[in-house]
Image (cartoon, helix red, strand yellow):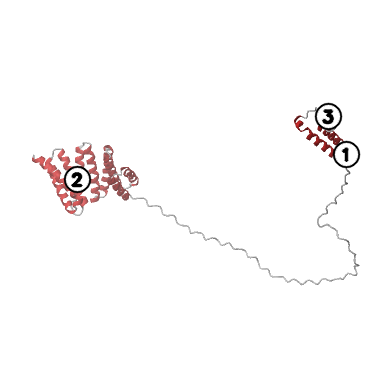
Amino acid sequence: MLARLVGIILGVLLATSGYVVAGWGSLGTWATSLDLGPFEPHRPAAGAVAAIVGGGLIIAALLPRRKRKKKPAPMAFGMELEPPTQARPVSALPVHKPAPAPALQPQPVAPPVMPVAVPAPQPEPQAPPPPPKPETFAQMRARLVALSDNGSWAEAARILQSMKRVAHTDEELTVVYRDLGDFARGQGQADDAAEAYETSVSYARMVRQAHPNDETAELLAGALSGVGDAAEAEGRLDAALSAFEEALALRRSRGGREAGDTQAQRALSVNLERLADLREDRGHRMRALDLYRESYDIAGRLAATDPARFGPDLAATRARLNELEAKIQG
């Protein structure tokens, strides 16, 4: 009821205000001076809208309202009741005896088959490759000679240090210290060369004393030749002469003149020339001439067997011999 009264009052106010603002009839002349602000250009339209809305509110408040019916509560699914049926007497109902159930025979149950895991074939363990065999002393020295011929001095120095570590016997120590002396002399290290050659001679004498044969004779002769070269380079001519004479005696004792032993013959020829040079420096020209002639004979035999290999040696010996003969005759 209160809502109807409020609607009628609001409707009357809106309708009256719209009538006055729009300036309809004689009642609206007094409100023409009122300023509507932004709605002033639309005064007739604004008044008409207010009057229509107010009239609508009055009509809505006066119309009777329908009563709402209550909706039945929704029933739960599957709970609708069926109309009751007439009950039959119990005695009238037919009695059905259940048939006896057939006896169940036990069926044999097979035991479950368990899967048997088949182990995967394992690869046969492969034996690790055998470690590489360490290089022998002889193999190292062969590599040293090849490196020296190619001028690979840095690698040759590393090989020499390795040879020095693996050398155990006196013979190997003789060889490695002689090679160290050759290397140091080639690098211009005269003091190191002389020291290495002296050490080589010390080991070579022990080998020669234990095994006096041709091989140990050449071993000691080679070490002594190194001592003679180092002493001559330092100007110690007496020491050089003594070393070369001892080396020559050892090489003559081992039969270096045999035709089949070309290496021994060449070593003897070179030793004769080195001693001849020292004799000439000391003023012993005739003795030097004899040594050169002996060396020339050996070089001639070697060149006859292998001209390509020993021909240059023969030419050098002939030139040196001719020079010395010219000095003696002149």
* Foreground pick, 56 / 255: 56
Q: Mark 2 — residue? A: 271
Q: In the rendering, which numbered label is found on residue 4?
A: 1
User: How far apart are labels 1 and 2 at the CA level?
Assistant: 151 Å
Report the number of discs: 3
Are there few (<14), some (14-19), or many (20+) residues within 10 Å of tag 2? many
Q: Circle 2 — which element? A: helix
Are there few (<14), some (14-19), or many (20+) residues within 10 Å of tag 1? some
The x and y percentages for residue 72 are: 85, 51
Look at the picture and state if 258 lies above or below 326: below
Residue sitting at the far top: 33
Q: Hey, what amino acid is under mark 1?
A: Arg
User: How far apart are labels 2 and 3 at the CA level?
Assistant: 157 Å
Which numbered mark, 1 or 3, is in the foreground of this view?
A: 3
The x and y percentages for residue 16 are: 85, 33
Q: Hey, what amino acid is under mark 2?
A: Asn
Query: Could you tell whether 236 is left or right of 157 in the image?
Result: left
Q: Hey, what amino acid is under mark 3?
A: Thr
| Image marks 2 and 3: residues in contact by CB distance under 8 Å | no
User: How far apart are labels 1 and 3 at the CA level?
Assistant: 31 Å
Which numbered mark, 2 or 3, is in the foreground of this view?
A: 3
* Marks 1 and 3, the one that precedes in the sequence: 1
Query: Could you tell whether 38 is left or right of 200 in the image?
Result: right
Q: Mark 3 — residue? A: 29
Look at the picture and state if 243 lies above or below 263: above
* Foreground pick, 234 / 44: 44
